[in-house]
Image (cartoon, grey):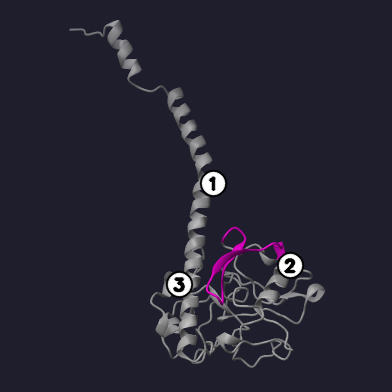
Amino acid sequence: MSFSLSPSTRGRTRRGGFTLIEMLAVIVVIAIVLSLLMPALVKSRDQARGLFCMNNLRQVELCWAMYAGDHEELLPGVAGGSFPGPGKWVSGWMDFSSSPDNTNTLYLLDSGYAQLGPYVKETSIFRCPADQSAVWIGGRLLPRVRSVSMNCWMNYVGTAPIGQDQFRVFRRLDEITEPPPARAWVFMDEREDSINDGLFQTNLKDRRMAAKIVDYPASYHNRAAGIVFADGHAELKHWQDSRTTPELRPSQSLQLDVASPNNPDIAWLQDHSSSPLQ
């Protein structure tokens, strides 16, 4: 027995499917739409990360202010070096090795190692959400716990000569008058290939043609770093000079303390870190 479709039935069958050309056309349209939407999606993601970053920094600054309030206006200490111990806002040394410092939250929470520890509820506030750095420990790839560093002029308790003979080291909250609290930065996200201890050093002695970058600020947010000031407000600081934002080489540390003549970003950091002694 033979069976055949009527002309009208065959027509409906063809109209019910897609030809290869039609499918290719649909794929092309979808690709065009995605290409148009992608920049907006990336921008939205970056904006969300920037908001989270600033919120984290505000939380860290709040802990800093609460500490000062509980200690007769005395500020938490900040010092360089890898030795963990008391008298500092946090301890620990960030690098790309398998050192447990990279993931040790006790250095952020325990009062024996971190003066801010008793005021901290979530250790996530110490890390910018855009910082993707991680280290291998015990056969597992783990995120590092901190991207935040403190302005070295906010109660430096170390012994290295950083220029304290010429510039103010703020010991108490009420001493932050020049620059005023709204212009004096306290915490900043530091680049993953620059960060080590909890101290961000800004060289105040060498200026203009002699200027140097000691530590590098982060630039996770479209060439900007999250930064919070002594009055509690946070912002994303955009860097102008490409020398401030060199290419990131994952898991490789930058050379620090390098010459950067007439770098406007260094001038900004100098103006917002401290002021000359009278």
Looking at marks 2 and 1 on the same chain, the residue that comes earlier in the sequence is marked by 1
**Frontmost residue, 135 versus 146:** 146
Residue extent of the magenta highlight:
221-243
Instruction: For the residues labelled 2 and 1, say whether their Cβ atoms are less than 8 Å apart.
Output: no
Badge 2 element = helix
200 or 164, nearer to the observer: 164
Label 2 vs label 1, nearer the camera: 2
Which residue matches tag 2? Answer: 264
Q: Which mark is residue 125?
A: 3
Picture quadrant where residue 152 is located: bottom right
**Where is mark 1, residue-wise?**
39
Q: Is residue 234 magenta?
A: yes
Q: How far apart are the two marked residues, 3 and 1, measured between alpha carbons?
A: 28 Å
The answer to whether residue 102 is left or right of residue 220 is: left
Question: If you read the primary sequence from the N terminus, does the residue marked by circle 3 or circle 1 appear first?
Answer: 1
User: Is residue 64 a member of the stretch shown in magenta?
Assistant: no
- x, y percent for residue 255: 67, 74
